[in-house]
Image: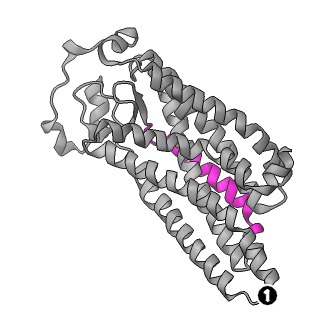
Amino acid sequence: DNMTMVRQWLPIWEWTSMPEYNYSRVRPVGVEWTETRGVSHPFYGGFSILWGTACEIMYIPCLYALFMERHHACYRIMLWLAIIDVIAIMCNSIGFGLILIEGSVFCSRPWFVWIVGCVGLGMWCGACIGCLLLVTYRLFELLNLSRRFEAQTNILIVLATCYALYFAFFTPPILTNSELNAMFYDPFIGDVPTKVYVNWPHTANNLLIVMTSATLYILLIAVLMTKQGAMSSEAGRVRISANGPIFIQASLICVFNVAASLEYIYMNFFPTPQFLIELGHISWQISHGVPPFIYLVLNKTVKRHCK
């Protein structure tokens, strides 16, 4: 039964402190959960679907451009990240929007909500490790050590894929709740303690991987400015300056990643105002959806191929 499953996740000394499950409140899976626990949000849901659809369309020429430049290690990582983003947008924007419009909760459509949460979580963590690879490559490039990195790029991409799949299929999912307009560890289905559902690996990913990436981006900018000031030749300064748009791209993506990661950790553990909850999810949507717009505005190589 439900309590047996819960006890499998808790130490034996905590069993006696758990409230007995109230079976009089158990309802079958289906529309009754939507009617009693869900709230329809057609505006926010519609916005999420429109945003996701626009991002998917904008990604089509970008994917082509990145594929044409796949012989470069940096662009192989960017191509892999773009594929991760396309899948993530299907979950955190389009799938999420459909759930909000219907006003579903976990027990309304368990399989659909579970798939959206599992895949979305895996792609988020994959994007985090991908951004870490990308900024590491940029640092190696500025320090004239990029050849060492390029030799291992394919292996690193395979490892990053395994990292994303681990979070998607071997850790607790995040589940959409239409009442709160976001995704949470807790499905909010009764008396089961919230700590049963906490995804500690995801929390570690958001704190360690994302913060490490942000630190490396700051280091990257510092190295760039130092090298630009130390360049004696005009050609050298031009080459360093040409990297400016690339670092602007990276910085913008990093800002949304950090905002989404910190907000999602906070709202899953502490009481949070509704506008911050929604801001956290929108930051997550933007972190996956904004790259094609940045590429088409700032990346000369992508713009050339698109034309």
Q: Position of residue 147 (x, y in %)?
A: 78, 74
Question: Does residue 221 sit above or below 198 in this rendering?
Answer: below
Viewer can see residue 73: yes
Q: Quadrant of the N terminus?
A: top left
Q: Measured along the vertical axis of the image, is residue 23 above or below residue 125?
A: above
Q: Nearer the viewer, residue 5 or 99?
A: 99
Magenta segment includes 159 = yes
Place residue 237 in its image quadrant: bottom right
Q: In this view, does 220 lie to the left or right of 5?
A: right
Q: Give the side of residue 306 with respect to residue 208, left or right.
A: right
**Where is the C terminus found, in terms of image quarters?**
top right
Q: How is the image coloured?
A: one colour
**Residues drawn in magenta:** 150-173
Q: In which quarter of the image is residue 50?
A: top right
Main secondary structure of the magenta stretch: helix
Quickly name the residue at label 1: 233
Q: Say what secondary structure mark 1 lies in.
A: loop
